[in-house]
Amino acid sequence: MDLTWEEGRAYLKALVAEYGLPFRVETFWGELFLYLERLSAEAGRLRLTALSDPGQRLRFPVLESLILATLLPEGSFRVADLGSGAGVPGLVLKLVRPELEVVLYEAHAPRVTFLEETIALLGLSGIRVERKHLGREWPEARFPVVVSRGYGSAEKFAAQAARLLTRPGLAFYLWRNDVEPRGDPERHLPLLREVSFELPEKGGIRRLLVFSSTSELP
């Protein structure tokens, strides 16, 4: 990583303060820094992310995951992360909300290995990886909360989240609205709300779509 331990911590603390997020960076920065180091080392080989600058990773996928973490229900519950890839948002959610029980679903074997090795390196419990090509095969488990970021389209996410949600259940999609289509996700799940927030350093607007497995608010 180009950012030192202290530079990265200070930068993320500034972002957390700027966005008014209720997190103490000191409580998870050690694990997050190790994760970002591994991501920097493996991202190119595994095509995990196009973001080569560690600062970009903090102000985009990490910050977006922190914002998502504040919108999840309170308490302990099971979360499925669809197409986890580099571990975003599921692994980051686990670091800042350790009470969550997280399952990372990923289809590509090298990425599964990366995630398993990262989880072991960080000494995390209550999080695991399953190799599944969702859409072709489905786990038996059902989840009260399903999340994803950059899954190809909002419609694809909603269609697959609908198969995995309990009733009632909530699905949260960090829609990369600048590079992927929306489609018609409401064909599969009712849209409860759409949360828009501006990304740092003129990074544009990110849209977080919240769906429910029922037509009523929880």
Image (cartoon, rainbow, N blue to C red):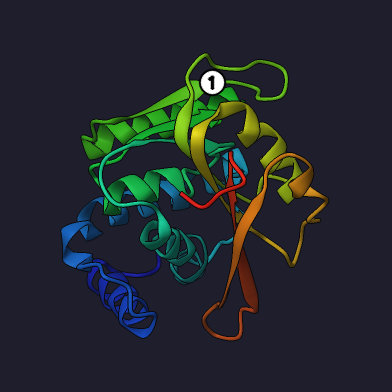
43 or 181: nearer the viewer: 181
Residue 84 visible in rendering? yes
Residue for point 66% across, 15% down: 137
The outermost residue toward the front is 216
38 or 173: nearer the viewer: 173
The residue indicated by pointer 1 is 131
Circle 1: element type: strand
45 or 162: nearer the viewer: 162
Residue for point 47% across, 71% down: 59
Q: How many marks?
A: 1
Q: Quadrant of the N terminus?
A: bottom left
- Looking at the image, residue 48 sits to the left or right of residue 40; the answer is right
Residue 153 visible in rendering? no
188 versus 211 height, above or below: above
141 versus 127 height, above or below: above
Residue 217 drawn at (x, y percent): 51, 52
Q: Quadrant of residue 126?
A: top left
46 versus 37 height, above or below: above
Please rate how many residues cluster around mark 1, counting C-alpha atoms within 10 Å: few if below 14, some from 14 to 19, many from 20: some
Residue 44 drawn at (x, y percent): 59, 47
Residue 174 drawn at (x, y percent): 58, 57
Residue for point 29% across, 49% down: 95
45 versus 25 height, above or below: above
- Three-letter code, disc 1: Arg
148 or 212: nearer the viewer: 212
Residue for point 16% across, 59% down: 27
Residue 203 drawn at (x, y percent): 61, 79
Q: Quadrant of residue 14?
A: bottom left
